Image: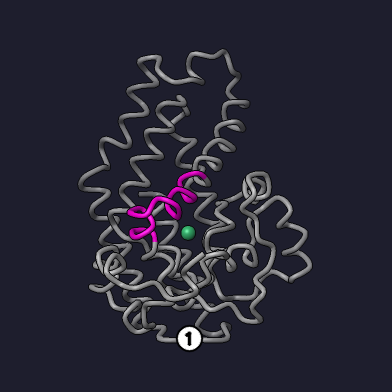
Amino acid sequence: MEVLLLTLALLLLISLLEVFFSARSEQKLTRTATNLSLLAISATLNTALLGAVVVSLPILLRDAGVGVLVVLPVPIWLTWIVGFVALDLFAYVWHRLSHQVQWLWRLHAVHHADPHLDVSTVVRAHPIHGMLTVIAAALFAAAMGFPPELLLWYQIVSTLVSLSHHTDLAWLQPRWDRRLSTVFCTPAVHRVHHSQHAAHHDSNYGGVLSLWDRWFGSYVADSPDAEIRFGIASLAKHRASNLLISLWLPVLLGKTKKAPEERL
Ligand SMILES: [Zn+2]
């Protein structure tokens, strides 16, 4: 709930700044309404169906002495450092799987279908993919025996970084973006990930750290395109901004012929 409230407050603040300072506002109102509706559906389903289990499972298992870091004699400060890095590696692996496993890609493609990138894109996810992500992260945290607060703090930090990736406010100078991108995921790094070209969107999966992409061969520094075209090439922009089409997209993509940009 804390992460949801923080996300909403920052979304509102950055959206207001984007209205005044961003270069484009393509279909801004329809897109934002669809993206926020997807957040509302996901939050409702997650709270109603998963809330109690996701919160109580890691606590129950930890109290029962289950979990790698519960069994090993690791000091608490080290648990937090190892845990934070491990959660970011888990986020990288889950994101990469969401691109490489076909049925997961069709769900995750709802996030990528946004024809423009701004702060509302962060919350644009298919509710089923959102639920699977929460279940997978909670099971991983429980198996590792992380303190329950660690998952919460990782979510807060990764949400802040994610908001900074997606906003179309040019808040970071290119030279600073380049320097920071040696370790962290920056706006320039993540924008490549939203390209229509499969070779580019199948790269730069990192959440907070870009090191995983560099170490596991999925890092792409720059898009060769002068201006990156966002979205799914085989899906018209106005359709991607429609809520019902967004919810039905995993089925639609199974029936739609891929555009040349989407083929590797
Ligand atoms: Zn992705």
Q: Is residue 200 magenta?
A: no
Residue at left offset 32%, top offset 23%: 60
| Side of 71 relative to 58 (left or right) | right
Q: Tell me how many marks there are.
A: 1
List x then y, in percent, for residue 205: 55, 54
Query: Magenta stretch mostly in which secondary structure?
Result: helix
| Side of 160 relative to 226 (left or right) | left
Q: Residue 191 or 32: which is nearer the viewer?
A: 191
List x then y, in percent, for residue 87: 52, 39
Residue at left offset 45%, top offset 86%: 26
Q: Specify whether tag 1 is near ligand 1 (CB below 8 Å).
A: no
Circle 1: residue type: Ser
Q: Residue 183 or 146: which is nearer the viewer?
A: 183
In the displayed image of the protein, which residue is found farthest to the left? Answer: 48
Q: Is residue 106 magenta?
A: yes
Residue at left offset 57%, top offset 52%: 206
The residue stretch that appears in magenta: 93-108
Q: Specify the color scheme.
A: one colour
Which residue was labeled with disc 1? 25
Residue 19, placed above or below residue 189? below
